[in-house]
Amino acid sequence: MSLFQAFVLGFVQGLTEFLPISSSAHLAIVPWLAGWRLEPRAAFLFDVLVQVGTLLPLLVVFRHDLIRMAGALLRALRGRERPWSPDARLGAWVIVATIPAAVIGLLVKDRVEAAFSDLRAVFVFLMFTSLLLFLGERLARRVKALSQLTAVDAVRVGLAQAVALFPGISRSGATMSAGRALGLARPDAARFSFLLAIPALAGAGLIAGMDLFSTRGFADWLLPITVGFVTSAIVGYAAIRWLLRYLATRTLYPFAVYCLALGVAGLILSALRG
């Protein structure tokens, strides 16, 4: 992988990780359209590790939330908060919602890796993401504050995140749609989705990092990974800021239309290419 390719893929990752259009799909589609021939195993590890670059802007943007939640949760666990404060409950629900994806991810890890090489499946999953986004908006009948989430709600959002392990199903799209279906306002659904992404990205990066060091010739990937990592972090920060402003007044429907159009166009083009 050249440094230019690493830069392009890092840019794509930073832009699409938080927009509900599936970063994993775009990381598979861009090399295919460009005619880049990347070794599948190494490319998969590169994609996952570059995703960790988008963890940094999350930590920056939500640093105050994380500090409040951690402090409140520790006080609650020590019995110093009765009843638990909204920050303590939110921290607990982030942990609860992380469990389904962590367990299922370990069970289907090999299948997820294999799915990255099946572009037609990626395009179908993109169309599924479109459906999730449409349903999330259509089912958002009632309004629930983030402080009103329950453990059952957290598990439901966590299951949505687990479904998004497969390339083409947007993690942010799935979790935001689940939040909308539960009654959260768009900014609150996005906030919970982004907080939930922190342990998910950290865990995936840790596992991929261990795999990378056991891969032959891993040293050759360190510079491209660094370029992609830094690029995704910078672009990801801008994407988070933009999306939070956007969702304050607008819907997820444009992203649903984009995913549907890309999925259909991709299936047609892949059929024409044979």
Image (cartoon, helix red, strand yellow):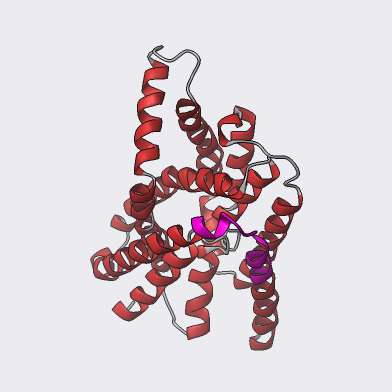
Where residue 14 sits in the image (x, y, percent)? 42, 65
- Left or right of 217? Residue 15 is right
Which residues fall within the magenta stretch? Answer: 244-259
Q: Say which residue appears at 41% left-offset and 25% top-offset.
A: 73
**69 or 222, which lies in front?**
69
Q: Does the magenta stretch include residue 169?
A: no
Location of the C terminus by quadrant is bottom right
Q: Where is residue 180 in the image (x, y as percent from the top left)?
A: 66, 46
Q: Quadrant of residue 241?
A: bottom left
Residue 255 is a magenta residue: yes
Q: Is residue 111 visible?
A: no
Q: Is the magenta stretch mostly helix, strand or loop?
A: helix
Name the foreground residue: 118 vs 92.
92
Residue sitting at x 59%, y 69%: 118
Q: Is residue 118 visible?
A: yes
Identity of the residue drawn at 55% across and 54% down: 172
In the picture shown, does residue 225 fall above or below 2? Answer: above
Specify the farthest residue to the bottom: 272
